[in-house]
Image: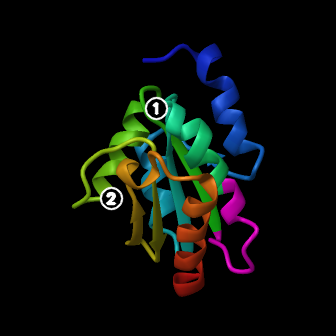
């Protein structure tokens, strides 16, 4: 478990871009099972979250089409929420950071950590925008 003061700026990075922070399993399940599209970002303290994942997610929102809802859970902090999100991302193995696009409660697009590490934020954003154009 990471201290709140350590993760506060990393949380605020996505919250300031319009992502709702979810802290419980029920909140995650309720959010994902809504009608429409939702982007779930599993946030993390790692360097690839700071350099690639969070910036990529924010850049992707410049697309004409985008998800109806944006939410985030924090690995190593919001254990219950992260566990629920990951269970809904099966068959993909747990990874953080990661991003999942759901439509009407169904997983339609997944970006795992190995798709994030070593890739520029713009490439991650482009991947997300292609998914938005197809599913949103």
Which element carries disc 1, helix, strand or loop?
A: loop
For marks 1 and 2, give the one nearer the viewer.
Answer: 2
| Gap in angstroms between the C-alphas marked 1 and 2 | 16 Å
Viewer-nearest residue: 110 or 123:
123
Residue at the far bottom in the pictured view: 134
Q: Position of residue 51 (x, y in %)?
A: 60, 40
Per the image, the residue denoted by label 1 is 78
Q: Position of residue 127 (x, y in %)?
A: 53, 69
Residue at image position (72%, 74%) is: 63
Q: Residues within 10 Å of mark 2 (few under 14, many from 20)?
A: many
Which corner quadrant holds the C terminus?
A: bottom right
Residue at image position (49%, 34%) is: 44
Describe residue 62's horizontal placement relative to residue 52 as left or right: right
Magenta part, dominant SS: loop
- Image: 37 above or below 135: above
Residue at image position (34%, 44%) is: 95
Q: Residues within 10 Å of mark 1 (few under 14, many from 20)?
A: many
- What's the magenta region? 58-68
Q: Position of residue 130 (x, y in %)?
A: 55, 78
> Is 60 inside the magenta-drawn segment?
yes
The quarter of the picture where residue 70 lies is bottom right
Per the image, the residue denoted by label 2 is 89
């Amino acid at each position: 478990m990471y201290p709140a003061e350590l993760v506060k700026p990393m949380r605020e990075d996505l919250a300031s871009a319009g992502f709702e922070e979810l802290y419980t399993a029920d909140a995650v399940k309720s959010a994902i099972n809504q009608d429409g599209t939702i982007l779930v970002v599993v946030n993390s303290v790692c360097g690839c979250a700071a350099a690639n994942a969070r910036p990529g997610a924010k850049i992707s929102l410049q697309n004409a089409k985008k998800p109806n809802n944006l939410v985030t859970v924090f690995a190593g902090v919001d254990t219950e929420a992260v566990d629920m999100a990951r269970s809904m991302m099966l068959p993909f193995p747990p990874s953080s950071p990661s991003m999942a696009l759901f439509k009407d409660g169904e997983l339609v697009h997944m970006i795992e950590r190995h798709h994030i590490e070593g890739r520029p934020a713009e490439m991650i954003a482009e991947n997300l925008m292609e998914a938005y154009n197809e599913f949103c």
